[in-house]
Amino acid sequence: MKFVKSTVGFAIAGMFVMSVWGDWVGKYGNLGGWFAAVAIIGPMWFLNHYIGLIQNDGDHAFVDMAWGIAWTGLMRDVFGTGENTFDFQRLISSLPTIACLTIGALLAAIAINAFNKKSTTK
């Protein structure tokens, strides 16, 4: 059940970000981006992390909303654009970006782990 709740939390955040953020930036520029960050990410963080839709147990890797938002945006474009209902080429063309993001997340996790170990040994 935790997986389903987390998936719903990720998807709701992703749908709001992917459907609203770009429009606000397009209409209001940088100010629209900042407003979208406050109006979308703030309430979604509250719902997902404070209320608890996304479960992050202490002994598991921490997964934040950005990962779910990215996958929601990708799947939205793969399944819901153009004349075809499934655009496999969009999925294939996004794999290098997904690989780079995954490598960056792994490097960040290694760095955080190293910093945490160093700070607890003092």
Image (cartoon, rainbow, N blue to C red):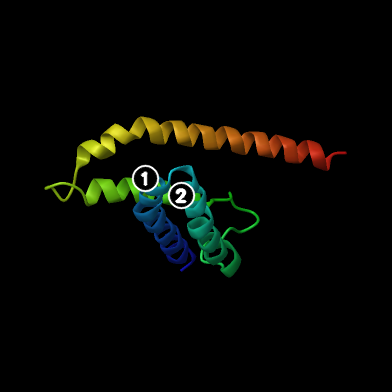
Circle 2 residues within 10 Å: few <14, some 14–19, many ≥20: some
Image position, residue 103 (x, y; %): 50, 32
Residue topped by disc 2:
32
Name the amino acid, label 2.
Gly
Circle 1 residues within 10 Å: few <14, some 14–19, many ≥20: few
Identity of the residue drawn at 34% across and 54% down:
19
Relative depth, front residue between 105 and 42: 42
Query: How many marks can you see?
Result: 2
Image position, residue 15 (x, y; %): 37, 57
Name the amino acid, label 1.
Gly
Between discs 1 and 2, the one toward the N terminus: 1
Identity of the residue drawn at 52% across and 33% down:
104
Identity of the residue drawn at 60% across and 52% down:
60
Image position, residue 50 (x, y; %): 60, 66
Image position, residue 110 (x, y; %): 63, 35
User: Vertically, is 120 above or below 9?
Assistant: above
Relative depth, front residue between 82 and 23: 23
Query: Are discs 1 and 2 less than 8 Å apart at CB?
Result: yes
Residue topped by disc 1:
26
88 left or right, relative to 48: left
Quadrant in the rendering for residue 57:
bottom right
Relative depth, front residue between 62 and 64: 64
Q: Where the C terminus falls, by quadrant?
A: top right
Identity of the residue drawn at 44% across and 51% down:
68
Q: Residue furthest left?
A: 83
111 left or right, relative to 11: right
